Amino acid sequence: MAEVRTISMDNTIPDTRVELCGITMDNPVIPASGTFGYGYEFAELYDINCLGTFSFKGTTGEPRFGNETPRIAECPSGMLNAVGLQNPGVDKVISEELPRLAAVFSKPVMANVSGFSVEEYVRVTEKLAAQDMVGWLEINISCPNVHGGGMSFGTDPCMAGEVVSAVRKVTDKPLIIKLSPNVTNIAEIARSCEAAGADGISLINTLMGMRLNLRTRKPIIANVTGGYSGPAVFPVALRMVYQVYDAVKIPIVGMGGISSAEDVLEMMMAGATAVEVGAANLVDPYVCRTIIEELPVTMERYGIRSLREIIGAAH
Amino acid sequence: MKQVILTITENTALTPTTWRMKLAGDVSAVTAPGQFIDLRLDGHFLRRPISVNDVEYGTDPDGGDGTVTIIYKVLGHGTEEMTHYLPGRELDVLTGLGNGYDLSDAGEHPLLIGGGVGIPPLYLAARQLMQRVRDGSVKDVTVILGFNSEDEMYYVDEFEELGCRVAVATADGSCGVKGFVTDAFRALVTECGSLCIAEAFGDENDPDSEPEYVRYTHFFTCGPEPMLRALYKEVYEEAGISGQMSFEERMGCGFGACMGCSCRTVTGYKRICKDGPVLRTEEILWQK
């Protein structure tokens, strides 16, 4: 309480602003790709301009239906998903989704790029980077639910570096590389991305897992395996963010199980400059707004005047 | 969609595995039969989507004094947990999810077909259609209910009390027609010529009255997928009656954000939770 009173007497509001790759955000809270669509479902509920930004649904070169259903299974404190990058393809995203997105969100948005070849990553990145509303590009080399692309780029330092070098050539906008936790040495992959020209690292994507149906004796998810997310993975994500912070100088977007303002502070102390909130959006559609509203009072509780001062404080 | 806190006012077993729960509060977001609500349960990460069985809006202009009824089958840990909830408990609920049935296509002689745990949403549809019978825009409402056996039966009396004509099928023949809802459908209809599927209506109080043959105008259904496939073939393709089918799928969010419950349709990809759960027979593309 003493701390709270001191800060209140100063009559200053805790500063939630952060700078991510040269762009200042009002707060570090970013709904994660694949849990927020293109924003309109949530814009029906509240003004999503309160967000730091959001990362829209992963986009590929061609339209994709994704995996067969069931795509979802519940787990203790989390869930498995194997959506498989369902999206209308980059051209329709630009012609149909982004104009609708622009009607409900006026800040720079984060475009999430996926692919099955280096050429596809380059093509999608180039097209999305040319859109004015796109502030950052998050290059997803870590989707565990597709075959022949996605995670296979993010589990090998050389291939990760190859993708980053290639997309680096087609845009000057900030490139944030989204990494998979399904690796032995996350620091090595992060360093490879930094050396190849990445402006930031985001992690973690989901952890590969599976569940069985005891009645059918078969996997619940049609794709057999899915990605585990939710509060259960928070300690794993925090550990990896901590390790990557030691390995690279570029900023980190931390994610994995974040569902409260306190989780945000903890992830930032581990080394994150900003955070993404994923699975929690699916259970509580207001969770990002709630976190943003609770950030100042939570900061006061821990004597934090500015979020920028706690980035990597645990090191 | 609206996120609200609802208070349980009733939670009772209708059969050993089927329970009815009534929840009081702001239910104003529920606008059509066939919609569902999504309940957050302690100790479970994902919400539980359950179809609306009935809704009463109350008199408060802000909608705060309504009641929504759900009927759920105990299938896993979540629904088992729900059976222990007592009246007075408050639940975090997303309300008014999904498109629901469009009753404006019912025509004069709608047919409602429900199987097992798919029966509950048809009750609100039947109640609203019976109001249209009183208005005169609908002439009669026929309901076919399918169960595994007599001891799993529920809500037959409730549909009859609404004034619907009710036919029952049980898989083991312990009540009504032995077999599936399609067997009950065949038992109801009589072929007249090559095209006309008709049903005999007579005046029950006048044994000399001539039966009137009418063609079902539209059907509304909900139930397990094998049942929906069979109805699609027999009622839509063979008898030529268009309908609306409510589908079930494992969901992540329940409001269209996660693409966890997508399906292919004639008009493109749809999300069962947001663009469905009700699809029209004309747009359904069966997989496999």
Image: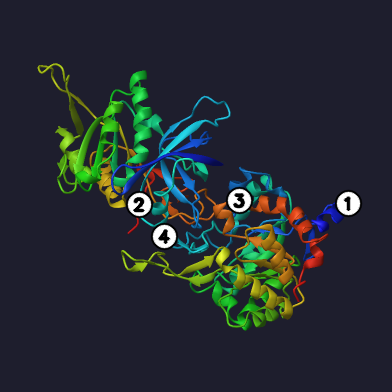
Cα distance between the residues tagged 1 and 2: 55 Å
Q: Residue at x 67, y 67 (%)?
A: A254
User: How far is the residue under mark 3 from the one under mark 1?
Assistant: 47 Å
Q: Secondary structure at mark 2?
A: loop
Q: Nearer the viewer, mark 3 or mark 1?
A: 1
Whether discs 2 and 3 lie on one chain: the answer is: no
Left or right of residue B176: residue A208: right
What subunit carries mark 3?
Answer: A
Residue tagged 4: A70
Of residue A63 and residue A239, the one placed in the foreground of this image is A239
Q: Residues within 10 Å of mark 4 (few under 14, many from 20)?
A: many
Mark pair 4, 3: CA separation? 26 Å
Amino acid under label 2? Val
The residue carrying mark 1 is A9
Same chain? Circles 3 and 1: yes
Q: Are marks 2 and 4 in contact (CB under 8 Å)?
A: no
Of labels 1 and 2, the one closer to you? 1
Residue type for callout 1: Met
Query: Amino acid under label 3?
Result: Glu
As displayed, is residue B214 above or below residue B153?
A: above
Neighbourhood count class around disc 3 (C-alpha, 10 Å): few under 14, some 14–19, many 20 upward: some
Residue position for label 3: A97
Coordinates of residue A164 in the picture (x, y in percent): 67, 75
Mark before the other along the chain sequence, 4 or 3? 4
Q: Is residue A68 above or below residue B244?
A: below
Query: Cβ–Cβ below 8 Å for labels 2 and 3?
Result: no
Residue drawn at the location 22% of the way across and 45% of the way down: B151
For residue B74, which numbered disc appears in the image? 2
